[in-house]
Image (cartoon, grey):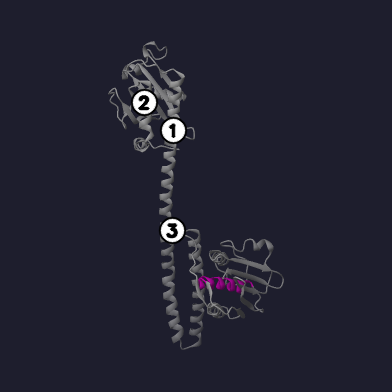
Amino acid sequence: MHVETGEEVTIFEKIAAVPRILEVICRTTGMGFVTVARVTENRWVACQVLDTIHFGLKAGEELDITTTLCQQVRQCSEPVVIENVETDPVYAEHATPAMYGFQSYVSMPIRLGDGSFFGTLCAIHPHPVRLKTPETLGMLELFAELIGLHLDNHLKLIESEASLSDERSTAKLREEFIAVLGHDLRNPLASIKAGTASILRSAEDARTSNIAQLMLNSIGRMESMISNVLDFARGRLGSGLAVEPQSRELQPTVMQVVEELRTAAPVHRIETDIQVHRPVRCDHYKLAQVLSNLVGNAVAHGNDAEPIRIVAALEGNELAISVSNAGEPVPEAVKKQLFEPFYRRKSGTSLQGLGLGLYISAEIARAHGGTLDVVSDETLTTFTLRLPNA
């Protein structure tokens, strides 16, 4: 625990127990001046003071460290106790008592919870005072430990508050970053999409029409990538991936995704079997995102000669949607990595993205309270999304 020099007085102003401790010491020992001092290699600073003898030192004021006996306490980490300077074999000729005009003196080391030296609990009096009794020394040691404990707890509280403040500032910055990211990526793309769609509608020759259609297909893939990136940022950097469930028919959601992907990957056959004949409650926008990711994964890794199949059904209180494709089986070692961010399987197609699709899909399932699993053998690879839907 670290205390910046200069902030000691402010800290001790907030520790209500210290003034009472100083008062008890004055009353029980008869010492007229008691202070808690911050003692470093170069400085001696009074943090809290009780002065009944008009010594003249106030909280926040300093003494020359070389003129104090607290420097010795810091160096040897042992208390210094003087009952009567005139008869003391060590300090009778010492310059410090004469400089500050005291006959009795005590200084107890104050340590923090990690054992580091903070300063001293120090008291002086112009007349001799009996201090070297077990009761008095035990009390002073106990008070020094108690002050260290209060100080340590207060410093931990300050650190916690600072950490919380930093966390709030960081969270705000993250949310602003995500908002700017979404705006700066989506808005230009929306303009490009609108312009390309206009070119496609007004195209007078097949070549222009084909180019415009290819551009729209690429824009669709970019939109999917942007959605994945934003969801990844929200999940990892922001407040988490949120879903907004609504009760709607499933068929239109599935078919919209299918039609978009049939346009983007016309070489692949996509078959559907939707056995859900009532509204289902989920975030249909996010569900479409999952389906787009799963079918896109099937396009990237499936056998072009075999269809991609989408099957949806209600199984008890769950909505189950599976996407299957023929092709090379997924190795067991790879299965463990499929749902990790930025993992990309080797593929001969250019339709691979950033490696976020399956990760985002699994996160969307989790946000709904559901699951996303994969089963793969020599015949089929099937991803199954299960969402609670009572």
Q: Is residue 289 magenta?
A: yes
Residue 144 lies left or right of residue 310; in this view the side is left
Decide if residue 119 is on the left or right side of residue 351.
left
Which corner quadrant holds the C terminus?
Answer: bottom right
Q: Earlier in the sequence, mark 2 or mark 1?
A: 2
User: First in sequence: mark 1 or mark 3?
Assistant: 1
Q: CA distance from mark 2 to mark 3?
A: 47 Å
Quick one: SS at disc 1? helix
Q: Is residue 66 visible?
A: no
How busy is the neighbourhood of tag 3: few (under 14 within 10 Å), some, or many (20 plus)? some
Residue at the bottom extreme, as displayed: 204
Residue 154 in the image: above or below residue 84: below
Residue 65's tag is 2
Of labels 1 and 3, the one closer to you: 1
Tag 1 residue: 148
Q: For the point 41% across and 39% down, which residue is it?
A: 154
280 sits left or right of 333 in the view: left
Amino acid identity at mark 3: Arg
In the image, residue 350 above or below residue 63: below
In the picture of the structure, the residue carrying the numbered disc 3 is: 174
The range drawn in magenta is: 282-301
Callout in the foreground (2, 1) = 1
Q: Identify the element where label 3 is drawn.
A: helix
